[in-house]
Amino acid sequence: MLITAKSGGGKTFMAQMFLTMMARLNPLISILERGSSYRPLVELMGGRCIDVDLEGAETLNAWDLPVGSTTPSNDKLAFLKNLTRHMIGMNSPAADTSILDNLLTDAIVSTYQRCRTREDRPIPTFNDLRQELETWRDESEVERVRDEAQLAAVKLREWTGEKVYARLFDRPTTIRTDENWLFFNVEGLTSDPKLESSMSMIIANAMSERASDGPGSRISRFSTSAGLFSIRRCWRRRWNSFSGPVESAARASGASARHWKILWGLRRSHDRTARAS
Ligand SMILES: Nc1ncnc2c1ncn2[C@@H]1O[C@H](COP(=O)(O)OP(=O)(O)OP(=O)(O)O)[C@@H](O)[C@H]1O
Ligand SMILES: [Mg+2]
């Protein structure tokens, strides 16, 4: 469902009214938004509000696997590869990134394999991928591949170790996502569009994964334009002909006969104006 209106036109009001009506079905509801307009409703429903920012201790590790699983699915590999490309700024659709794509996918698989045997922390984080890329040796021994790997490793430094973004991207998960109502406020990330969109991709993926486990109704609502952008990117491969939020909602509904999902895409033109200024 796509709701559009001018700023102050009642989009949030209407979305909250729908959510309240659906609450009787006891669905899983995941909200990703800038600002705290959903906080009162989510608190009223006994859900969890999570302020995602660089100062907090709240982390969702993009590398997490479903309980009991030790190897990533192809979907997970594609997601991590696309996320990594986005983080290192190699996400232009026009660029020929086939070498980088292949090498990232191989390096992500190797990273999982290497970390699986690690007793204390079998699930990797981005620093493990950075280390893998730093010493990457392609079986073809093509120099260009090694160069691309090393360049990607250098670009990943910003997101790993003790760097500013590492707290969000290079730590094991601390956020509990077992509440029916979850609200992620990403207002604290708006200083850097790449940071906000990367984190929105991770949240969207984690919410999509929680929505695909077990029975029940699922609702995911992603309203910032950055959120929509992220979803487009991370689901592009999975749903090849994805062309907009309405279509994605239809596809999501069709993905499971027992479950249904509504993606409410909301564009806040004043956000874009504020960002441009
Ligand atoms: N149908 C309605 N009845 C009564 N009040 C309403 C109705 N729709 C909206 N409002 C009130 O109008 C104000 C603005 O609504 P809302 O915050 O939903 O707008 P919005 O489209 O989400 O704005 P923004 O683009 O700034 O997020 C709020 O105070 C809300 O309570
Ligand atoms: Mg609103």
Image: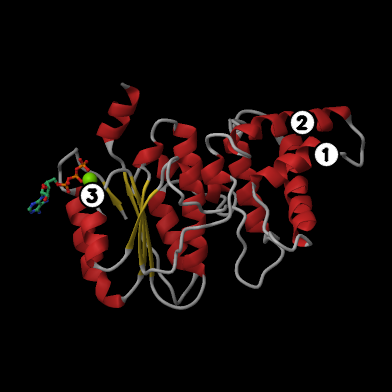
Q: Which of the 4 image quarters holds residue 112?
A: bottom right
- Residue at left offset 78%, top offset 57%: 113
The answer to whether 138 is drawn above or below residue 172 in the figure is above
Q: State the separation of the CA atoms marked 1 and 3.
A: 46 Å
Question: SS for tag 2?
Answer: helix
Residue 2 location (% of width, % of height): 31, 50
Query: Is the residue under label 2 in contact with that under label 3 (CB below 8 Å)?
Result: no
Expressed as whole percent of the image width and height from the top left, the position of residue 94 reads: 61, 28
Q: Mark 3: which amino acid?
A: Ser
Dot 1 surroundings within 10 Å: few (below 14), some, or many (20 or more)? many
Q: Which residue is mark 1?
A: 136
Query: Position of 113 compared to 87: left or right?
Result: right
- Residue 134 % position (x, y): 78, 36
Tell me which corner region of the image, top left, top right, bottom left or bottom right, holds residue 268. top left
Question: Mark 1 CB in 8 Å range of ligand 2?
Answer: no
**Ligand 1: does it lie within 8 Å of the C-beta at label 2?**
no
Q: Which residue is mark 2?
A: 150
Q: Which part of the image, by quadrant, shows the N terminus?
A: bottom left
